[in-house]
């Protein structure tokens, strides 16, 4: 009987405190992405991100997110130039550690992500396409990791993250996408 009462008391305490440990918000920002590839020079493109996030927990927290972003890369070689941009749906699930108070909170976070490509836009010179025949055959999804730091000022949140691909978006040329992202958000719940 004592075990049942103790278990019920613990369950009630967890349920009561869980409401105080949950937040929901919107975020938006800018990112700088690049696609590494064999045999060509690459440079970054500037994109965007906008979406939702939830944060569950206090000192240690879980932060699932859902957002749309624009990424891509520019390519050049002796054969010509090209550019590919993508509109993606990102789903990261981050584990984080926070330091500070409710009004000023510093955070570190890392975790996996899954990306689904919603659309793409490509422009390659004719000579580039002739030389690199299968360069623009991209996968419709990929995965990797995110790691970064953030700060909360009350309901305002800001994050700086690095996103590394663990999956090649084009296996023929070993293309992997990397992103630096800076975002600002607002916790409304």
Image (cartoon, rainbow, N blue to C red):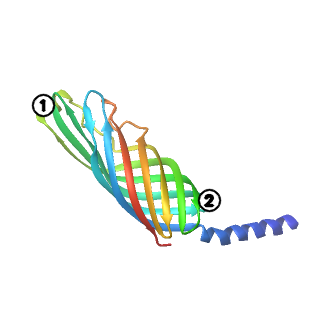
- Quadrant where the N terminus lies? bottom right
- What is the quadrant of residue 66 in the picture? bottom left
Q: Give the CA separation, mark 2 to mark 1.
A: 55 Å
Of tags 2 and 1, which is closer to the observer?
2
* Left or right relative to 125: residue 1: right
Residue 1 in the image: above or below residue 46: below
* Left or right relative to 85: residue 101: right
Residue 5 in the image: above or below residue 107: below
* Left or right relative to 127: residue 159: right
Q: Which residue appears farthest toward the left when viewing the image?
A: 126
Residue 115 drawn at (x, y percent): 39, 48
Tell me the tag on residue 127.
1
Residue 65 drawn at (x, y percent): 46, 58
- What is the quadrant of residue 185 in the picture? bottom left
Residue 132 drawn at (x, y percent): 21, 29
In percent of the image, x 49 and y 60: which residue is there? 151
Q: Earlier in the sequence, mark 2 or mark 1?
A: 2
Tell me the tag on residue 11.
none
In percent of the image, x 42 and y 46: which residue is there? 162
Q: Which residue appears farthest toward the right when viewing the image?
A: 1
Q: Quick one: label 1, few (<14), some, or many (20+) residues within 10 Å?
A: some
In percent of the image, x 17 and y 36: which residue is there? 81
């Amino acid at each position: 009987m004592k075990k049942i009462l103790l278990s019920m008391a613990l369950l009630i305490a967890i349920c009561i405190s869980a409401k105080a440990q949950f937040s929901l918000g919107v975020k938006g920002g800018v990112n700088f992405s690049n696609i590494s590839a064999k045999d060509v020079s690459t440079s970054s493109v500037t994109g965007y991100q906008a979406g939702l996030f939830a944060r569950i927990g206090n000192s240690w927290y879980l932060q699932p997110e859902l957002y749309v972003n624009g990424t891509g890369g520019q390519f050049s070689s002796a054969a010509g130039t090209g550019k590919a941009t993508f509109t993606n749906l990102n789903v990261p699930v981050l584990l984080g550690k926070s330091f500070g108070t409710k009004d000023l909170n510093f955070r570190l976070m890392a975790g996996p992500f899954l990306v689904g490509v919603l659309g793409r836009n490509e422009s390659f010179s004719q000579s580039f396409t002739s030389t690199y025949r299968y360069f623009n055959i991209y996968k419709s999804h990929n995965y990797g990791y995110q790691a970064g730091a953030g700060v909360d000022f009350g309901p305002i949140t800001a994050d700086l993250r690095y996103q590394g691909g663990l999956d090649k978006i084009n296996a023929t040329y070993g293309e992997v996408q990397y992103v630096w992202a800076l975002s600002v958000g607002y916790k409304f719940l």
